[in-house]
């Protein structure tokens, strides 16, 4: 009797687990939907992954972050994709598959990783995971654009001190609000980290990231800032050039 | 803590939220593209209407949407329409009262609308030479890879006494690459001791590290 119960429970457990396994459901290469757009896929060359923030959709032709992905694909010969922060698991799976293709050919799997806004937080967790799980051989370049902690509650809690107490007295002078959960470059697994940020746009994490190789405060004439949602539009050429110089030329 | 004292943080929080809600801009920045989409869907007429709005934020949106339309027109081979929109954007610059929108026109709109357009490149070079939205003009020229941009930006870099602008001109030169960029970076780094304690909000240790890293990546894969 006990044996039958154990067997029945095992069957149930297997069935439940199977139901929980997420299916690989990204659109084919070159087809964009709101959550994902694999721009190019090659058998070799660097892999570039762009992670969008909260309001962004991968098929929005006005979106600066999407333009970064499209322009990078033109300038770097390899595989390039853009995923929403909501499809982080699919993005990790895509990187794993692309890296595997390269390793089977005896090539080094190199990754260029870009994250904007909430995508900055999600991509920093991805970078940590890729290094821990040895998904890629190296993250050649990691770029964050106005990185913000994902989630309204978490982000609000982290920045409450700044918003309620100090920001009025010491505007934009709060290093304690810096985005600190990004992995530090070690020169081997994570080569470089370039951080583009603004101090006025959100008052959230607007400060340099102490561990980044390069910190760029994005600045207009007379100290104006372009705004959190539009900063990615302004710095498209800079980010594309960062990727091109780090990963090598070529492209479509 | 007395009841009244406990109420103060709550009142402060409510006041801040109330004030934030009254400022259109705080939400605007978070929902940039979603605000642009309906204007884009409305076509050139709707974008032109936005570009003439009494609200600076609407003009900003309208002009950026127009610049995307110019870019797409050029990509689809409609050079005439692209130039028409580029001219319209340049005309708006002269009557624009918001400094922020003028910067957007020079830094973002002209870069989208001005590729391969000699009039747009001349417009940007004039802004750079006149010191009007010069940083934005330098970035746009570098992004467009306009002929003669390198020496023009290098000249602006040497001319200005404002280190914040010097730093930005260096960035534009880095984007462009080539000998003017290497020369300017070497000059700046050799005199870094004279540079100020802070540029924008960045301490010297931060911006120096960034400049050194930029210099190292100059010369890598410079020809597309």
Image: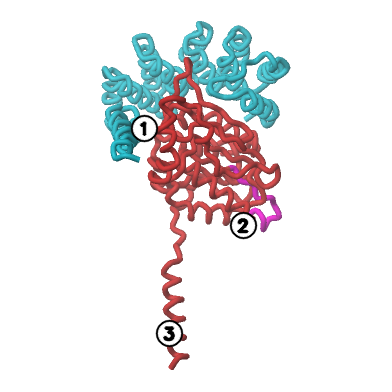
Q: How many marks?
A: 3
Question: Which residue lies at the image location 43% right of the left edge and 41% below the top edge?
Answer: A53
Q: Which chain is cyan?
A: B
**Residue B182 at what x, y percent from top left?**
69, 20
Write down the chain letter for disc 1: B
- Quarter that holds the N terminus of chain B: top left
Q: Are marks 1 and 2 in contact (CB under 8 Å)?
A: no
Query: Which marked residue is nearer to the observer: mark 3 or mark 1?
Result: 3
The Cα atoms of the two marked residues, 1 and 2, are separated by 36 Å
Left/right placement of residue B91 relative to residue A75 reads left
Part of the protein shown in magenta = A101-112
Using the rendered view, name the quadrant where residue A158 is placed. top left
- On screen, residue A48 above or below B142: below
Write down the chain letter for disc 3: A
Q: Nearer the viewer, residue A86 or A205?
A: A205
Using the rendered view, name the quadrant where residue A184 is placed. top right
For disc 1, the marked residue is B32
Can I make out residue A188 in this image?
yes
Residue furthest bottom as drawn:
A1
Question: Which residue lies at the image location 29% right of the left edge and 34% below the top edge?
Answer: B11
Number of other residues with Cα within 10 Å of mark 1, as a class: few under 14, some 14 to 19, many 20 or more: many
Q: Are marks 3 and 1 on the same chain?
A: no
What numbered label is drawn on residue A8? 3
Which element carries disc 3, helix, strand or loop?
A: helix
Q: Nearer the viewer, residue B143 or B160?
A: B160
Q: Is residue A105 magenta?
A: yes
Please name the colour scheme applied to the rendered image.
by chain
Residue furthest front as drawn:
B2
For disc 2, the marked residue is A133
């Amino acid at each position: 009797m006990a044996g039958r119960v154990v067997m029945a429970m095992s069957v149930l457990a297997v069935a439940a687990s199977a139901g929980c396994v997420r299916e690989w459901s990204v659109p084919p290469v070159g087809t964009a939907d709101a959550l994902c757009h694999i721009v190019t896929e090659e058998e070799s060359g660097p892999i570039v992954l762009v992670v969008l923030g909260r309001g962004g959709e991968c098929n929005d032709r006005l979106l600066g972050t999407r333009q970064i992905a499209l322009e990078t694909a033109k300038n770097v010969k390899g595989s390039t994709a853009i995923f929403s922060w909501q499809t982080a698991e699919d993005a990790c799976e895509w990187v794993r598959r692309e890296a595997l293709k390269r390793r089977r050919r005896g090539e080094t799997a190199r990754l260029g990783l870009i994250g904007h806004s909430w995508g900055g937080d999600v991509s920093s967790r991805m970078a940590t995971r890729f290094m821990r799980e040895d998904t890629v051989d190296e993250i050649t370049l990691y770029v964050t654009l106005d990185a913000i902690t994902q989630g309204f509650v978490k982000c609000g809690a982290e920045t409450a001190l700044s918003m309620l107490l100090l920001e009025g007295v010491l505007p934009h002078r709060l290093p304690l609000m810096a985005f600190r959960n990004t992995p530090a470059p070690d020169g081997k697994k994570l080569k470089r980290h370039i951080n583009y940020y603004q101090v006025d746009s959100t008052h959230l994490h607007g400060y340099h990231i102490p561990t980044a190789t390069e910190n760029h405060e994005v600045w207009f004439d007379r100290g104006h800032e372009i705004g959190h949602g539009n900063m990615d539009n302004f710095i498209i050429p800079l980010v594309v050039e960062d990727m091109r110089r780090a990963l090598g030329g070529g492209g479509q | 803590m007395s009841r009244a004292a406990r109420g103060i943080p709550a009142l402060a929080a409510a006041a801040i939220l109330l004030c934030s809600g009254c400022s259109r801009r705080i939400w605007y920045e978070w929902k940039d593209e979603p605000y642009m989409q309906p204007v884009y869907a409305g076509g050139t007429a709707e974008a032109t209407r936005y570009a003439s709005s009494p609200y600076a934020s609407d003009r900003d949106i309208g002009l950026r949407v127009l610049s995307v339309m110019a870019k797409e027109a050029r990509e689809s081979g409609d050079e005439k329409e692209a130039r028409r929109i580029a001219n319209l954007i340049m005309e708006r610059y002269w009557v624009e009262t918001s400094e922020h929108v003028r910067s957007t026109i020079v830094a973002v709109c002209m870069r989208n609308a001005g590729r391969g357009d000699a009039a747009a490149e001349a417009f940007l070079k004039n802004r750079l030479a006149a010191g009007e939205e010069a940083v934005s003009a330098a970035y746009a020229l570098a992004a467009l890879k306009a002929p003669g941009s390198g020496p023009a930006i290098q000249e602006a870099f040497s001319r200005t006494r404002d280190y914040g602008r010097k730093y930005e001109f260096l960035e534009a030169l880095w984007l462009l690459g080539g000998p003017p960029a290497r020369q300017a970076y070497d000059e700046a780094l050799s005199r870094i001791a004279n540079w100020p304690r802070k540029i924008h909000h960045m301490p010297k240790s931060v911006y120096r590290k960034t400049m050194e890293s930029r210099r190292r990546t100059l010369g890598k894969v410079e020809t597309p």
